[in-house]
Amino acid sequence: MKKPNQFFFLLCGVLTMCGARFGVGNLTAASSWDGKTPVEYVLSVETDRPEAVYKKGETVTFKIRLEHNKKPGGEQTVEWVITKDGLQPPLQKGTVALKDGRAEVSGALGEPGFLRCDVTLKRDKETLKAPVAAAIDPLEIKPSLPVPGDFDSFWAAKKKQLAAVPVNARLTPVPVSPEWPGVEEFDFQGDCIGAPVSGYYARPIGAKPKSCPALLYVEGAGVTDLQVLTPVRWAKEGFIALDLNAHGIANGKPKEFYSELAEGRLKDYRTHGRESRETYYFLGMYLRDLQGLNFLAAQPEWDGRILVAEGVSQGGAQALAMAALDHRVTFVAVSNPAMCDHTGMLVGRIAGWPKVVPVDADGKPDRTVIETSRYFDSVNFATRIKAPVYFDIGFTDLITPATGIYAAYNNISSRKRVLNGPHYGHGLPYPSFWNDFAKVILEEVRSQQAGGK
C-alpha cells in the first residue's frame, strides 16, 4: 500500500461533517479565534488535564485566558456557564474578573457524562466565545434503553426483501483529471427498494481479479452532489471505492437541482415517516447502503477479504449500521457519528442528531416515535458489530453529542479504539484531519493484509 497522498485531507470537501483532533499532545485550548483572520483579542478555555478525562465527583478546573495582541488581556469580566452536555438549565453560571488576562472556574459531575464550560466576553459590539468539555467516566456511559427484542428479526426481514432486488448496476464513465493517472471513475446507478442507489465508483485501471480491498464512503447530512474525488483518491491507494449518495438522487446536476430537493420533498427528511419503523426515512437510506456493499462485493477486483465502511456524522451512523448488518465489513472508521441514543431524554441526557423524538411542552417525549427510533439507533447497531472499529469524538459537539456516541462505543465488544477531542465540535478541527483519518484506515488495512485481526 502507498502512503496517503498529501492532499488526502480534501477527501470529502464537506467541512461541516468531521470530528476531533488526533493525539493528546497536539491539543490546544478552545479559542474564539479561527486561526486565520487577524484579531485583537483571543479568548480561550481549557481543562486542567490535557486529556480532559475525570472520575465522577472529581473537580474539573477550567482555565480561562484572554490575550490582547498576543499578550495578557488585562482586567476584563468574563461570563461563564457550566452544563451537563450543554443542557439547560445550567449546573452553574456566573461572571469572573480576569487578572492579568487569567481566571479559573470549577465544577463537578456526579454521573458519567460530559461537563461543558462555555465562556463569553462582551466588548462594545464584539462578543467572543469559547467552549471546552471534560469527560466524566465516559467508559461507564450506558444506553438510555436496551435493544428491542425483535431488532434482529426486523432487520433480517428487510435484508431478505433486499436480496430479491438485483443491483443491476449501470456504470457511466466519468472523466478523471490527468493529476490522477491510473484510475478510472464511473457514475454508478443501481436498483434498490424505494429510491435507487446512486454514487461515484472508482478503481485502479487494469486491477487484477481479487487484488483490491474495498471501501464504502457514506455521506453526511444534507442534500448535495457528491465530491467526484472521494473514491478517486482511494482508488489511487489501490482500493475499489464507492461514494454513496444518502438519498439515491442523481449525481452531477446543477446546484439548483439539489437546492430544490432540499427545500422540497427532502426538506427535513430526518423526520420523514418517523411514526413507524416501516416508513422512517432512514430505512430506505440503510437499504441503499447495503445495496452499495452488495455492489462492491460483486466486483471481480475485490480481494474477497477486506471491506471498509467510512463515514462522519450521518455517514458515521450509516457506517456503524453497515458493520452491524453486513459482517463482510472488516473495519469501520467513524467521526462524530450521528443517530446515537435517540432516547437520551429519558435519562436526562441530550439526544443526538437527528433529534428525531419530539418532546411536548411538558417535557414528555412522543412514545410512538421513541419506538421507531430504537430500530435506527447507533447504540443498538453497536451491539451487533464484529469488525474492529475506530471512533473519533469531539467533546463540545452538540449536534452529535459525545455522551450518546460513548453509549454506542461502550456497546461494542469487538476490538475498538477512540481518540478524543475536548475542544472540538462538529466543524473541521484542523487542516490535516482527512489525511490523519485516512492514515488510520490505511494502517488497519495493511495489518489485515498482513494477516492481522
Image (cartoon, rainbow, N blue to C red):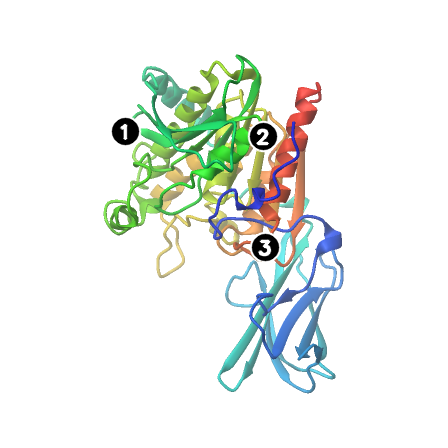
Nearest to viewer (mark 3 / mark 1): 3
Q: Is residue 60 left or right of residue 119?
A: right
**Dot 1, how many residues are within 10 Å of its Cα: few (below 14), some (14-19), or many (20+)?**
few
Q: Split into 4 quadrants, where in the image is the N terminus?
A: top right
From the viewer's perspective, is residue 349 above or below residue 367?
below
From the viewer's perspective, is residue 407 above or below residue 68?
above
Mark 2 to mark 3 CA distance (whole Å)? 25 Å
Helix, strand or loop under label 1:
loop
Residue at x 26% of width, y 52% of height = 263
Q: Split into 4 quadrants, where in the image is the C terminus?
A: top right
Q: Earlier in the sequence, mark 2 or mark 3?
A: 2
Give the image location of residue 355, x and y in percent: 42, 50
Give the image location of residue 421, x and y in percent: 64, 53
Numbered tag placed on residue 194 in the rendering: 1
Residue matched to label 2: 237
Residue at x 64% of width, y 51% of height = 21
Mark 2 to mark 1 CA distance (whole Å)? 33 Å
Q: Are marks 3 and 1 in contact (CB under 8 Å)?
A: no
Give the image location of residue 239, x and y in percent: 55, 26
Q: Earlier in the sequence, mark 2 or mark 1?
A: 1
State the count of labels: 3
Helix, strand or loop under label 3:
loop
Q: Is residue 296 left or right of residue 452?
A: left
Mark 3 to mark 1 CA distance (whole Å)? 36 Å
